[in-house]
Amino acid sequence: MQEIQIQNMSFPRYIFAIGGAGKDLIYTTLEKEWILREIIKPKFTATTVDVRIIDTAIDEENNDLERIQNINKNIDKIGEEYRSDPNSANKNIGRINISYSLLTKEMTLQSPYDLIGIEQNVKKATGASIWWINDPQLGDDWYKKVINRENFKELNFSKGVYRKRAIGKAIYYKALSQGLFDIDLPLTAQVDIIVGLGGGTGSGMAFDLATKLKTIQPTADITLFGILSTLDESPDEKANNFAMISELEHGYLNKDTPFKNVVLIPMEVTRYPGKEKASDEHERLLREFDETIPYIFVAWYNNPGQLFFSNLPEYAPFIIATSQIVRYNVESIKKLKDKVIESLQDKDISLKNEDELYNNIKKFISDSSVFQAELESKEIGESKETSDETGVSEPKSSGIGSIRKIELPDEDKSFIKERLSRLNLVLEPDEKSVSAANFFKELDYNSIIHIKKAVDDGIKGTASDDIEKQITSIKSETDTISIEDKSFRDDVDSALYKILKKDIEIIEMMKDVLNLANNFPEDIVKDTLKVIHTF
């Protein structure tokens, strides 16, 4: 995937990745070396990003810690590389701090009472007047209803909270009451919260955590990145999406939302049916989807288009972000480039051979005693024809350049036109064909741009259909082209320019040689020269 090139990328100061989807996406992001380098690279004002991963799935702890360890190793390696670079002097190295909280392991959760019977602690920590799980206004049997409905009885967190948003919220508030979310935020903090809307942990905690952060620092800008489930996932996951979106919209409508922006990212393209039903193909598509997320994050913070979302309506004020993976077969492209370079080298050899051949033919003609005799005869005849009334003749130039009595036959003109048309196929290829010329054009090679302009201007400048005049005019135009080496896009562009310019030079030489051959006095030699020339 092509790396995004920006002078200095912007990143949020804090990132909270909550639940299975949230942590997987932040792992995928931080496993990209180019992202680590953009954060860590030396600047006069260093970038610092604090990442906090929050989850409830006990069985996934070892895998989580292993991935975090590998990321930290890469962070240390890149940081050491920059510190040893002399160009980093007087600059500050960026920092990435990663913390991991497995809430179900950090707190006591041995019975339903550990979540339900914490009313006083929650009220003290939050200032709330009611702890919703055992709200007396809901009746004496509410306690039993909550235990049965929300599956509090089992308290099995090996895979998390199993898409139960209520349990996710209860765990969050128990953690809050125990001081596990005491965080200091600076005045201008940029905060990201990354969750999957279909799960229980992320979907259950995101809104309440954002509210807590906004209480700590009212000026913090908090953006929620929420992954929308597919239509093929379970009813529980769809219900969680609906509940979370309803909660978000309710906050906006009542002007009581902690979020500055809500970015929803649909994953429908994967057709993912959930872990229990997912095939290998679903998992592959899901991994591809995860690969797009780092680019969405970077694009969000480094795209002026973000300004377009500053005045969203209160109803459904959500931003939809989608992305696709564009894959380039680098090996095939390299092979194609190698073949193009090989073809250009072959063409260069061919042009050099042509150049040598035409010069040899010119030399043969100029050294020929028969041709010299014919030349002298024509010059004497022309001298007589151009004498004025006083009998004084005008001086005539001598040499092979002065011979031009016989007009080129149509077959020779056609030969020159066909050669020029082959050149034009490179400059203006058939869009339906698949050739290197199409790639040259698509890549906006300066060689194509300048030579094509010279050919077009040369033809227009003659105001004639005479191919000989056109070739001479085109050659004159190419002689005026001046391009600096740094203007070429790559080495292929530079080599192509030299080949095209030489090709035009050879076409003009071919025209001159045909003129000489057609004026040769002996037909057998003339025909032989033309056959050699067109071979």
Image (cartoon, rainbow, N blue to C red):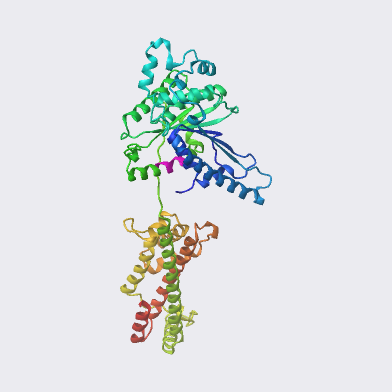
Q: Assign the C terminus to one quadrant of the image.
A: bottom left
Q: Which residue is at a point 41% across and 70% down the rendered structure image?
A: 507
Range of residues picked out in magenta = 289-296
Can residue 326 be seen? Answer: yes
Image spot of residue 165 (x, y percent):
40, 26
Above or below: residue 79 compared with residue 259? below
| Residue 406, placed above or below residue 238 | below
Viewed as shown, does residue 180 lie left or right of 237?
right
Main SS of residues in magenta: helix
Q: Position of residue 292 (x, y in %)?
A: 43, 42
Residue at point 44%, 89% (across, down):
369
Which of 123 and 420 lies nearest the eye of the viewer? 123
Residue 176 drawn above or below residue 426:
above
Q: Residue furthest right?
A: 90
Please determine whether, in this image, residue 516 is positioned above or below residue 173: below
Report if residue 107 lies within the magenta region.
no
Q: Nearer the viewer, residue 72 or 317?
A: 72
The answer to which of 125 and 253 lies nearer the viewer is: 125
Q: Nearer the viewer, residue 134 or 458?
A: 134
